[in-house]
Image (cartoon, rainbow, N blue to C red):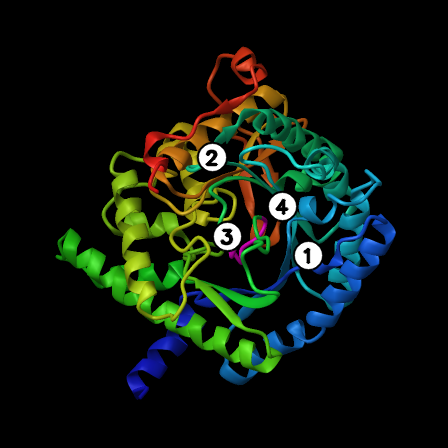
Amino acid sequence: MLETRDILETINMIDNENLDVRTITMGISLLDCLDENIDKACDKVYDKICRYAQNLVKTGEDISHEYGIPIINKRISVTPIGMVAAPCQSHDVVKFARTLDKAAKTLGVNFIGGYSALVQKGFSSGDYALIESIPQALSETEFVCSSVNIGSTKAGINMDAVKMMGKAVLDSAKLTADRDCIGAAKLVVFCNAPEDNPFMAGAFHGVGEADCVINVGVSGPGVVRAALTKCDGYDITGIADTVKKTAFKITRMGQLVAKEASKRLSVPFGIVDLSLAPTPAVGDSVAYILEEMGLECCGCHGTTAALALLNDAVKKGGVMASSHVGGLSGAFIPVTEDAGMIAAAKSGALDITKLEAMTAVCSVGLDMIVVPGDTTADVISAIIADEAAIGMVNSKTTAVRLIPAIGKKAGDELNFGGLLGLGPVMPLRKGSPEKFISRGGRIPAPLQSLKN
């Protein structure tokens, strides 16, 4: 039974501490849309998405209105298009991107994810064409997001795919240079990508998922920070316990929304992703949580330890509040989307080397980081490989979402506006990895992958 105190506490979290449901994401399988004729396949894809998701936006708005819970985004994820495109005799894979974009516009969703390929161990017939088409697809569409999984703990790292993705990231930025390089901001490169992630730009509907599911992503960095302001005199154990209790309350709200959306849409409930996803809004920051723990600024020594504590406590607290937890579930550290990270990067306290260290204990990786526009594709590939290695060896999800700021240099600024925020162009380390990247092949899976 809910007590009056609990209700009032939740209202305060929503009104004053930026608590929200960041997204309701409907995952839709397109495996029954395969066809040798690409035009027929696209027609099937459009019809199925529009049929299944026709009430998604309205349902989200109704739940938000009735319960007073902000639901920021309504999104769709689909089967990786690399698989859907495999039987097609045409290599004009961009037709699928245009189809997804058309469906998103028809339905009124914020984003649609799944222009994706899973190539951790090699390429299937549709994967090459899809990866090569990513820059064009992201430049020609408004709502489509793309992701490619290039490595896993079981398979190792596909270095041929890593090389291709360095070029894809750079070309995506170049083709959208007149729009603040937004193409690169809609492209994620994964190692150990989860198949039920509701967050963009990395969402896709995995082949092991049901035909259609509802996944919900919650967010509440401001709530956690507010709870820690009342912890003067607590030791680290007390801090961890406070975060766990707060994560439980945040996730409980997500579970409510997920079950209600599932019932109203007559679609199975998938998972709640209990991630702390920040925004540029003042107070809604993971960096500020770390500083509330006692750091002078995010990026100083101790930051990685504080983030590890936060990530672990969020998972432990949230998992008790939902019947099914999945996705990424933990703390995100996107630079341009977090007011505290932006401030730390601008001051020089946070650089890409420290961010890479932090990714060993967070839930995503090098996320929304702006780099100089003259950065080469080989350097981008090397950053992807470094991050994938962290994920592969530690059996965790890592990802890279870099934005080469075409025409800008270190110290300049790139401003996307909205949830994507703004950020300083961060300098990179010197030295060329060109020969290493050009070797290709596959980094073998680590010994700990042999668990059978």
Mark-to-mark CA distance, 2 and 1: 24 Å
Q: Which residues are magenta?
A: 196-201
Q: Which residue is mark 4?
A: 416
Asked whether the residues under the numbered discs 4 and 3 touch, taking CB atoms below 8 Å apart as contact, a structural biologist would say no
Left-right relation of 340 to 28? left
In what element is the residue under mark 3? Answer: loop
Mark-to-mark CA distance, 4 and 1: 35 Å
Q: Amino acid at mark 2?
A: Ala
Asked whether the residues under the numbered discs 4 and 1 touch, taking CB atoms below 8 Å apart as contact, a structural biologist would say no
Mark-to-mark CA distance, 3 and 1: 38 Å
Which one is earlier in the sequence, the residue at label 3 or at label 1? Answer: 1
Indicate the position of residue 350 as horizontal and vertical percent values.
Answer: 39, 34
How would you rate the neighbour count of disc 2 (Cα within 10 Å): few for under 14, some for 14-19, many for 20 or more?
many
In what element is the residue under mark 2? Answer: loop
Q: Nearer the viewer, residue 353 or 153?
A: 153
Q: Which residue is mark 1?
A: 31
Quadrant showing the C terminus: top left
Asked whether the residues under the numbered discs 2 and 1 touch, taking CB atoms below 8 Å apart as contact, a structural biologist would say no
Q: Residue at x 70, y 30 (%)?
A: 171
Q: Is residue 193 above or below residue 9?
A: above
Residue 280 is tagged as: 3
Asked whether the residues under the numbered discs 3 and 1 touch, taking CB atoms below 8 Å apart as contact, a structural biologist would say no
Q: Which residue is mark 2?
A: 155
